[in-house]
Image: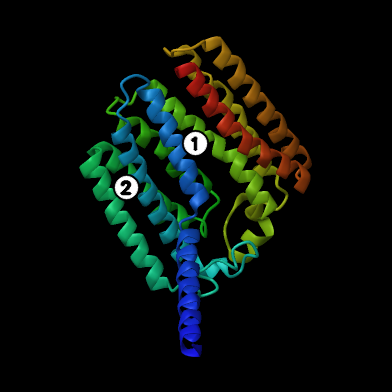
Amino acid sequence: MSASIQTLGTADRSGHAIARRLADYLEMTKPRIVALELIVAGVAACVAMPHGLDAVVVMHALFGTALVAASASLANSWWEREADTQMQRTANRPLPTRRVTGAEALCLSALTLTVGMSWLVLRVNLLTAALGLASWGIYVLLYTPLKKRTSLNTVVGAVSGAIPILMGWTATGAEMNLMAFALAAVLFLWQFPHFMAIAWLYRNDYARAGHQMLPVVDPSGARCGAQAVMGALLLIPVSLIPAVMPTGGSPLVYFVWAFFLGMAQLGLAVSFAIYRNEKSARMLLRATLLYLPAWMAMLLVVTF
């Protein structure tokens, strides 16, 4: 009896160890970022082809996109494993704590990239696959190393972050037109107030890790605030472009909603630029987190 209990205990511990390891692998893929990319890609697909949408192809596109995005995060986690030990918010991640080895992260990154790219090529189309590879390359090979070299890394990272919208659009077979690029531009510009708020809140962490974010390069925060305002300001006219494009709903409703969202976000960006404190940064960050789903929801409403 005691031997059976011991065996069960060993199996239970082994099961927990496997579960913890899988949880660590999942954490390194940065699932919240992956989820955001899937949402924007899915919305873009619906806007591109509101009638006659091939749901099966879109699901294939989302699956491949998820794998490519996960691969990029895994590669980024491997690349920044030493820097992450210097930051309070990242020091407990799987690689800095050595719960996962660098070799494991690289192998997982290579595996998910290979499967994801193959899936997009075979199940979706070459253009969507090419966009996925471009997003991966920009994020891993440009944005990640540039974080140690220049504050312009944010601009490069924003390009990579905007590409999933184009992936969702092209997955439907629709041609990339003004609407497609307008949607991608909204996501590109949205990232500046969003990233500047985060960079200010964690500026000390970034400084310890040697990341050349704007609040590190310019401790006064003046340039950080200015970039947040500029991104939020440019976002307003760009976000209004869908109002003049053919849609299935009322363009006036979309115009008013997008304008209201943009102005609210701009107001908080201006507040952040003026005060440059934790309260104004957190308010701006919350506004950016509300802006994106609210904008996409209205986009779907006027499309259908």
Residue ID at (29%, 38%): 128
Q: Residue furthest bottom?
A: 2
Give residue 64's position: percent from left, percent from top: 33, 46
Q: Residue furthest front?
A: 1
Q: Is residue 59 above or below residue 138?
A: above
- Which labelled disc corresponds to residue 133? 2
Tell me the SS state at disc 2.
Answer: helix
Give residue 268's position: percent from left, percent from top: 71, 33
Spatial CA span between label 1 and label 2: 18 Å
Front residue (pair 293, 179): 293
What type is the residue that disc 2 sits on? Leu
User: Which quadrant of the figure has residue 113?
Assistant: bottom left
Front residue (pair 83, 146): 83
What type is the residue that disc 1 sits on? Phe
| Proximity of marks 1 and 2: CB atoms separated by less than 8 Å | no
Residue ID at (68%, 60%): 204
